[in-house]
Image: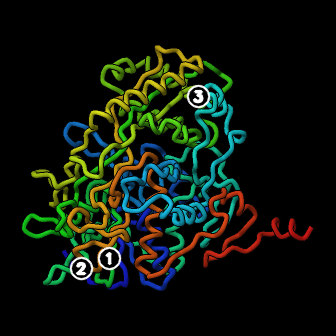
Amino acid sequence: MTTKTEYADVVIVGSGAGGATLGGELAEAGEKVVFLEAGNDLDITYGSPNHYAGSQFFGDTLEKELFWHEEYSGFNWRTDMGECAGGGTSFYGGVLEESSPEDFEMWPFSFQEFMNYINLTKQRFHVSRWPVEEQSPYARLINNVSNGEFSPIQSAFNREPYTEYGVYHDKCRQCRFCLLGCKNNAKASAISVTLPKARWYGAEVRDNSLAVRINTDWTGSRVTSITYLKRTKTSELTETLELRIIYAKKFILAAGTMMTPMLLHWSGRNGEALANSSGQVGKNLRGHFCRHTMGVIPRQDLDTYKGQVVELSDQYRNYDKGYLIEFNMAAPPAYMGMLFEVMTPEIATKFIGVEYKRFLRKYGQLMVATPMARSLDDGFTDNSVLPHPSRLNKYGLPLPHVHLVPNTQEAIWIEDAAAHAKGIMQLTDADPQHIWSGRIDAVHKKGTCRMGTDPSDSVTDLNGQCWDLDNLWIADGSLYPAPLMANCAFIIYALAYKIADGMLGRQTIADSGAEDDSSADDAGCDQVGNGTQKPGLLKTMKRLF
């Protein structure tokens, strides 16, 4: 195996929500940024036959290893990772809930102290909450039968097109295929918003580049380089490997909740993880436990899959009850693919052969709710991601071993949430015999490299800088010091902007009015590469006449 040496100002491991966002800010500031992305780079050229989402099939997300599953302790937990440019944001629905003030009670800063970055993220990602009137007939039905309890969720689906950093973002077509990626670039995500900014300012993406070790100087207090494997596929089952070492001044880990702590463990000495004087690397894994609940609406005039993706949530109206419910988050192919994954064995056996075919004919009436229990802990949990004692990947490195179980209160909330979802479905006159809930699943896994103010119980400070290494930062969901109720991508984006300010010694201020629906404010505007706005023709004409 040959070895190649490279140099950069900043090396970022991972190009997902945190890495791409932070990389864009650093590249704009003049840093030479190189991303090490374990998966494939993806083409997002609008209208191109090579657009990654243009001819995507649901099975591709598994066959091309864009997602991966691993069995831990008898459960097939999904990793919530997308091993590709943009990470999981490239495929998951664009739910961008900002969370609530109560969420931050156990964080080292308050919701209000963080509000500037929340508003900045709304502005940069064109976040909006589409009104009920613009939702599909099915969404309005759920809103009506629940007496307004379920209403539009905050998302980043464009209500108007715009161009930014050389990327054209079309208006959302409400086609509901977001889990396969958006060929119209209508869903704001790391791959469509912040990674193009990084590239615009000269950042490079080294795809199929798996980081395997962080190297330090003799004192162990400063990172000197990262060793990675440049993988070139030669067939379906074979690849060639080139060992590369890249040197830089600053290093950022943004490989996600699972792989960031694993890389620190792979890089340690004498069985101890790197940057682990607190003993918290890989500890305190948290997530949202759920039981996907499905039913069939007895109406032929409504297609549940048509309309705005992730149409409805309860906007925390059940926050004190301990759970959040979302209705119909994706297109039928995604649900058909996950049916057996979430079904209990008893239910799955009823859907073999003819019975399953008959069910598939009702895909247009399939209702799917995701009742999620609030993650409950005091900032420290027994759940963890640590090196497996015996299982290795194909490169001889320990695989993650995950301990992830709901506590007593979370288990109660899961059942309460599933019962609530079933109740809403029954209000649509769905047949109770055709309403069921799957086994316990876990989504939005976060934590494992918690931030804090005390080096004895946290891995990084409030700006994501590791206590033990003066030129290593972390910028992904592993930073979460305590759980949130809502989906997590939005806060990862916001944290990345905060970390960028800390690294660059600045304070970015969101534009006034950023709390409003920015996508509506920006309608008719084009955006130039430096991030500033210039009035579009439509808006100019309105001002003149």
Residue at numbered disc 2: 223
Mark 1: which secondary structure?
strand
Of tags 1 and 3, which is closer to the observer? 1
Q: Residue at x 65, y 76 (%)?
A: 532
**Amino acid, disc 3:** Gly
**Of callouts 1 and 3, which one flags the residue occurring earlier in the amino acid sequence?**
1
Q: Residue at x 46, y 20 (%)?
A: 435
Residue at numbered disc 3: 364
Question: Along the line of sight, which residue is nearer the eye, 272 or 104?
Answer: 104
Mark 3: which secondary structure?
helix
- Horizontal side of 203 relative to 365 (left or right) equals left
Residue 5 rendering spot, x and y as whole percentages: 26, 84
Residue 507 rendering spot, x and y as whole percentages: 51, 77
Are the residues flagged by discs 1 and 2 in contact, CB closer than 8 Å? yes
Question: Compared with residue 217, is residue 231 higher up or lower down, i.e. above or below?
Answer: above
Q: Residue at x 63, y 20 (%)?
A: 299
**Amino acid, disc 2:** Val
Question: Compared with residue 317, is residue 116 higher up or lower down, i.e. above or below?
Answer: below
**Of callouts 3 and 2, which one flags the residue occurring earlier in the amino acid sequence?**
2
Spatial CA span between label 1 and label 2: 7 Å
Question: Along the line of sight, which residue is nearer the eye, 95 or 463?
Answer: 463
**Of callouts 1 and 2, which one flags the residue occurring earlier in the amino acid sequence?**
2
